[in-house]
Image (cartoon, rainbow, N blue to C red):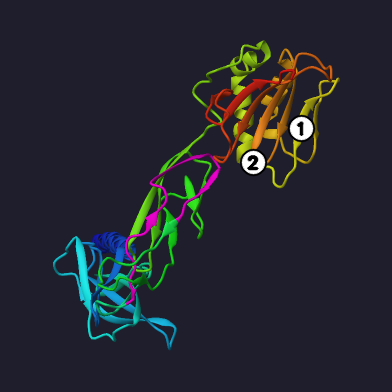
Amino acid sequence: MEVIRKSKSYGILLIVLLIVLYGKSVNVSANAIDIQAPQSLKAVKSSKTSIRLTWKGNGEVDQYQIFRYNKKSRKYKKIYSLKNKKKAAKITWVNKKLKPNKTYKYRVAACKTVENKIYTSDFSYWVSARTYKKNARKVNSGIPRISKKVVYLNQCSAKKVKCIIKASKYGTNKKKKAFSKKVRWYSSNISIAKVDGTGKITAGKNTGKCYIYAKAHNGVTSKVKVNVKNYARPTEYYNIPEESDILILLTDYKREIQKIAEYCQQNRITGNKLVTISLEKDLSIAIKGGNFDIAPIKKEVENLLIHFPYYINIEIGPGSVRFITTKSQDDEALPGIVHYSFDNTWNELYDTQIASHWIAYRFRPI
């Protein structure tokens, strides 16, 4: 009986040990699969018959596989495996014995061997370069030139930047031109700002800083810094008009108008519609001009329209919100206007500006 019990206990211990070892093996393999694709890949002419590739090194991988595009098969084919012996911060490899005056396209993948299995990363982005003589007219591109170094955006607003691709500085021909002016745009953080293929930068709902990159065909890159702020919520208003209704609106009802403005810029009206929100005699909220969901800001709208000591309407357009106050319901009463613009394309009226994107004034008799 004692022998049987001992054998059972040994069996249980063996099973536990196998589970632990198996678990460790699985974890190692799982971590090995997660390999980052090579970063900062660039391609430049090395000679009239060779192209030099460079990329950021990764000390955790064992080798890099270099792929070149094949026009006949329309696929990338592996042309070389480069062992990562030195674990350098920058990797360089030269593709020799190429044809002159021809464009070649490349991608690179990283590999790591774990337990006799090779795990491969995703491809890097593609780069291309052309072989040519010193006096060639068609050459590779130089560093992209972006029209802005810093862009300031309001939440959900947009601004377009231009990018010019000129010829590489290497080459003696005065009439040289870049063979490709294609630009690839991308963002370091799309939750703050994204960019389309034309260079139009659109701010997201998150505020903060990020970079927008313009990449030429050969991987040479330039960047523009993007600073996204929420101008619907300024820290303070200044140059406030002395009219009592405007003054109360910007002080006692600051939270309400900022919350309404912020919501409207994040949930924009499309087209040329104009939505008006006003208060009926029975203290119900009337919405005219189209369907606009005010449920998330209903509390702020009701508090403003019901408790504000003067008559007030809210006008919401595709790019702005206006808070229109009057001291009476007389048609001849001259309204006071507090106007908030969403986008950066608005014309600033400095004599009536009370904060960035905000203006306040009262109509006067002519």
Residue at the spot of label 1: 276
Looking at the rendered structure, the kind of residue marked 1 is Thr
Magenta stretch in the rendered image: 137-162
Q: Is residue 189 left or right of residue 121?
A: right
Q: Is residue 318 left or right of residue 162?
A: right
Quadrant of the image containing the N terminus: bottom left
Q: Secondary structure at mark 1?
A: strand
How packed mark 1 is, by other alpha carbons closer than 10 Å (few <14, some 14-19, many 20 or more), is some
- Residue 22: in magenta span: no
Q: Secondary structure at mark 2?
A: loop
- Between discs 2 and 1, the one toward the N terminus: 2
Looking at the rendered structure, the kind of residue marked 2 is Asn
Residue at the spot of label 2: 267
Q: Is residue 42 left or right of residue 150?
A: left
How packed mark 2 is, by other alpha carbons closer than 10 Å (few <14, some 14-19, many 20 or more), is few
- Work out whether residue 145 or residue 117 is closer to the camera in this orientation and state it: 145
